[in-house]
Amino acid sequence: DAHLRDVAIAENYQAVAVGAHGQMFFSDDTAQTWQPLPGITTRHLNAVAFLNSGTAGMAVGLDGTMLQSDDGGVSWTSLTPATTEALNGAVLINEDDAFVVGAGGTILLSEDHGLTWTAQYSGSSEDLLSACFLPIKTRIRFAVGSNGTILRSSDRGDNWQSVSSGTARNLNAIVFQDTLRGIIAGEGGLLLQTEDAGLSWTLSEAVTAQDLHDCAFAGNNSAIAVGEGG
């Protein structure tokens, strides 16, 4: 059985899902049908991401595993690991710039299409579970994780500051609709929202007690969060 952990959409109706033991599945018909991809790794893959309106992609997982695709997920190559920590999130900013986050406060930055990676000092030892950047203002970047951790950088990740979340619950996903408004989804149905570019966050009314693992904006100022129990 497939134990899948993340899915991402590239252009041209292509999509990739990743999961346990290096499982990867590919679709080229808007996720109507899926085909398994040849195994590149046997390590668990925790996340996959594609460049907005592009075919460049990354998948990350245990033991610093990093995979790269330049054709919308049809084929993948393994990158030289830059850490032994588990990697939990990947963000592609443009064709050259990307950053990944992981266990123990790990943040790695590449500015050469994944050829080399530089460790950035996060100032945190918490496990980082998700990351993003502000639309248009790509210098402003975020990472969220265990124990209510929110990290914000305004200089492309050279320096990171801790932002109060008001909670000790795990924060599993973060996304922004525009340069001001964003949401975070987390443990126990937690939802946080910001309207000032992530400088401060407020608790939204809970609609479930189940853990939420991902979130997205759906247009018309509406948002979707998904998690345990359907």
Image (cartoon, grey):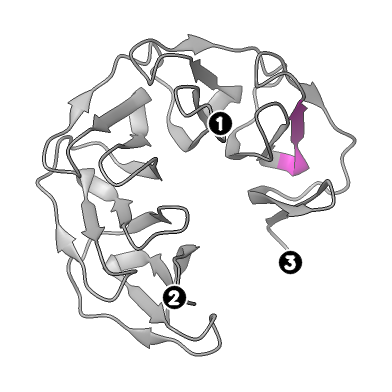
Left or right position of 105 against 6: left
Question: Dividing the image into 4 quarters, which one contains the C terminus?
Answer: bottom right
Residue 163 at x, y percent in the picture: 60, 12
Count residues near mark 2 (Cα–Cα under 10 Å), then give few for <14, some for 14-19, many for 20+: some
Dividing the picture into quadrants, the one containing residue 160 is: top left
Q: Residue at x 70, y 21 (%)?
A: 167
Check whether the beta carbons of the residues at disc 3 and disc 1 lie within 8 A of each other: no
Q: Position of residue 70 (x, y in %)?
A: 25, 63
Looking at the image, residue 214 sits to the left or right of residue 201; the answer is left
The residue that label 2 is drawn on is: 14
The relative height of residue 184 versus residue 208 in the rendered view (above or below) is: above
**Amino acid tagged 1:** Leu
Residue at 28% across / 19% down in the picture? 120
| Along the line of sight, the residue nearer the viewer: 132 or 4 | 132
Tell me if residue 68 comes above or below residue 131 in the rendering.
below
Q: Residues within 10 Å of mark 3 (few under 14, many from 20)?
A: few
How many other residues sit within 10 Å of disc 1, few (<14), some (14-19) or many (≥20)?
Answer: many
Whole-percent x, y for residue 189 in the image? 76, 43
Query: Is 6 in front, or is 68?
Result: 68
Q: Earlier in the sequence, mark 3 or mark 1?
A: 1
* 191 within the magenta span: yes
The boundaries of the magenta stretch are 188-194
Residue where numbered disc 3 is placed:
230
Q: Quadrant of the N terminus?
A: bottom left
What's the residue type where badge 3 is placed? Gly
Disc number at residue 134? 1
